[in-house]
Amino acid sequence: MPKSEATPTRPCLLLLDGHSLAYRAFYALRDANLMTSDGQHTEAVYGFTSMLTNVLRDERPSHIAVCFDRGGPTFRHEAYDAYKANRVEAPEDFHGQMELIYELLDVLRIPRLSAPGYEADDVIATLATRAAASGLDVLIVTGDRDALQLVDDKITVLMTRRGISDMTRFTPEAVEEKYGLRPAQYPDFAALRGDPSDNLPGIPGVGEKTAARWIKEFGSLDELVRRVDEVKGKTGERLREHLAQVIHNRMLTELRRDVPIDVAVDDLRMGQWDREEIHNLLDTLQIRGELRDRLFKTLGTAEPETAEGFDVEVTVLEPGEVAAWLGAMPEGRAGLAFLGTYGSGTGRLDGIAIATSAGAAYLDPARLTQEDEAALAAWLADETKPKAAHDVKGPLLALWEHGLDLRGLTCDTAIAAYLAMPGQRSFPIEELVLRYLNRELRYETPADGQASLFDDVEAGMARDLALKAQAVRELADALERHLAARGGTRLMTEVELPLTRVLAEMEHTGIAADRQYFATLEAEFSAAAKQAVEAAHALVGEQFNLGSPKQLQEILFVKLGLPKTKKIKTGYTTDADALAWLATQTDNELPAILLRHRDQTKLRATVEGLIKEIADDGRIHTTFNQIVAATGRLSSEKPNLQNIPIRTAEGRRIRKGFIVGKGYETLLTADYSQIELRIMAHLSGDEAMIAAFGSGHDFHQATAARVFGLPPDQVTPELRARIKAMNYGLAYGLSDFGLAGQLNIPVAEARALKEEYFEEFAGVREYLNRVVDQARKDGYTETILGRRRYLPDLTSDNRQRREMAERMALNAPIQGSAADIIKVAMLKVRKAMEGMRSRMLLQVHDELVFEVAPGELDDLIALVREHMGGAYPLRVPLDVSIGTGPTWEDAGH
């Protein structure tokens, strides 16, 4: 095979911190969701390869090595048990890519080095010292600031700042310019500053500026320790109090330059590489195009560290200091962070941190003077003071409980991240700052809240909350830029942000519950479940566990010899669909009894859960989830109100336990009729479907009449049912097989029915094809308000994953648009209700529930019809159904 060799232009050893760079590459590209067709993620591999290629191209080194942590304990762990004990675990998607990076380095003939008992930083320090002594220049590429202590006339550090291409070159002059210190003084400075990412606490209230000033003034840490009594004020007291901690830190922050690693500098010379090997690996990783070309052109001529964290000088505001601090606050958006507990419609507020461009402050709401509280209340409620916070709905409840309010919120970083990454289920701020700022939140307070030998927990909590507020302030800017590029700014500012306040109000209000009614209902369902157990035992002639799939298989298929169901790993399935099928295939009553037992057990569990959630005020305060469903739909928990069955008479009895509260006249429910089908007609523009809505007949009856060529009054219930299944199923990618199963007809007949349907509604077929094709080109779908759903599997070579993504592409614009519309409706209705005593209580599916004050019913009905019906102008007008009654069930329609 042909061989190639790099042609360096200067004698230089390039040393790279492998885990640090791989980790940074992973987070820089994680949003791209890069993976091979068999599901192997490649963000870290791709980003690391790109970063390596750039450095090789720009620096043309003669020697190279990539250093890694071993993963086991090091001499630092032996000296300090808690070393790096609070390090955030890297995602599983990252761990799975390290072996691929090792393989890449091997085929590139780049040495990868590590040493047991030492970290990659120590191996780098040792090799850099050896190479510099032999006359080579050394270039270190890392995200770990501890490497700055190595900088001298021969050793330069390239520090990664953002993404995979933004780096800062640190020479001795650059280190002094940034920190006011010589590189050799850096370990002294780091010991004072501390490093929470390594679980090395700093001195409470002492930030980087103060630490640097001390080292500059005294010359070294040793001299500072010797003259420690000369440091005056509170910071001096804290320094003396934590001196043992600082000395301990100093021992751990010094990089070792004597690691016993058996490699000579000359062994690290750039070696030969094999073009075919590299091509084969890149083919396996499915890395093509520009990066592959750039790599070949260049070659032809742990928990890893991250970049620096957040530097914040925090002022702990004492009673009487709040008003003055707020009055001196600079212009610009402030970041907010809250300490407290939230849930069941209320909350407790234990701390507030406010970060600005000039610094941060921490205050304890329980210790405010009257003047402080008035100043804080005025600032928080001032619409003209822009603010950013993270997942603010819970803190809103706590603020209200404390008599405070929050206005002027221009960004909620959790909501912004949700709109940017709708497929993710949670948005911890620690992960977001890694992804969007490539920095780490390095907390000082242990996760368990207990003080360690060197911790001042109260000061640490203040600093940690201030760090979070500062992170929110900077993260908001990054996320807003990201959202603007994706067209999501308006959706956040005009819909999701204002909706947070409406949801918090609904959680705070709750809905009244009839505890005694629920208790009686629970007893009935429990008795019915017990009767089903007794009936099953009597029928079979022996006792068995109705909840055990293994025992059910033995009873149904062995003892009773009933027809076999679908084969699964553990035998034959006994799920609800299988039992329902068995009930139609045999005269044996057991499948029906088992289904009844499951229904009654589930109903009992639902009611039992509701009883537990009734608060002291007699109301149930559910929690609405705004940033969970990828489609934009709201959900709820504690309790999950979407779990309350409404399709059976027994299930609907549960809704009777939700009642109108004292002092109110009635409950009112309002929901959209066939909203998803109306959106389908709007998006497809199919004239026949639009005409069916305007025909004056039942929509399913009207569409069935067109498909079968009958007058609407001659459409039988069976024909209507067939077309109803089509109408609702198309948006979910209903297959011929799925339709056949729903209607219990042969697959060929289902296929013919779909063809008849599309002959009449050709515009619908064209739309369904068009939306998938466009999503495949764009990589995402969009709703009527621009909410995106990213679907990378649309181009997957795996048929199952590709087809699943296609079904999502069909459904997301329709279901997501329905979510957009009801959110807009909630905002419009709530605004129109200003000045009324009536209250909005719940949002479930496409339904809103209100509690109506005496004398306001007619006005409320009118404004609900107006603003729900006018939430969005569709080609088929939105239709709102309204009902009233003393219970949620009675108010149904």
Image: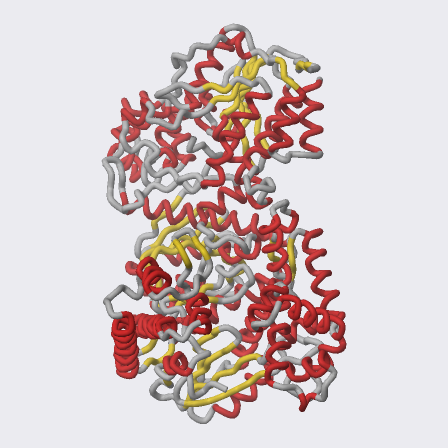
Q: Quadrant of residue 563?
A: bottom left
Q: Work out whether residue 825 or residue 893 is closer to the camera in this orientation and state it.
A: 893
- Residue at image position (23%, 67%) is 543
Q: Work out whether residue 246 or residue 446 is closer to the camera in this orientation and state it.
A: 446
Display colour scheme? secondary structure
Task: Please state if 509 lies on the left or on the right of 782 as rendered.
Answer: left
Task: Please state if 399 lies on the left or on the right of 530 as rendered.
Answer: right
Task: Please state if 521 lies on the left or on the right of 16 as rendered.
Answer: left
Q: Residue furthest top?
A: 134
Q: How many marks?
A: 0
Q: Work out whether residue 152 or residue 219 is closer to the camera in this orientation and state it.
A: 152
- Residue at image position (71%, 33%) is 290
Q: Is residue 378 above or below residue 173?
A: below
Q: Quadrant of residue 601?
A: bottom left
Q: Is residue 405 above or below residue 525?
A: above
- Residue at image position (28%, 58%) is 367
Looking at the picture, how far across and down is residue 343, in whole percent? 35, 65
From this viewpoint, is residue 271 visible?
Answer: yes
Task: Please state if 874 lies on the left or on the right of 431 as rendered.
Answer: right
Looking at the picture, how far across and down is residue 204, in whole percent? 32, 40
Q: Is residue 244 above or below residue 626?
A: above
Q: Work out whether residue 582 or residue 178 is closer to the camera in this orientation and state it.
A: 582
Q: Tell me the quadrant of the picture where the N terminus can be found.
A: top right
- Residue at image position (65%, 58%) is 781
Looking at the picture, how far across and down is residue 635, in whole percent? 46, 66
From this viewpoint, is residue 481 visible?
Answer: no
Looking at the picture, how far across and down is residue 182, in whole percent? 46, 21
Q: Is residue 509 above or below residue 556?
A: below
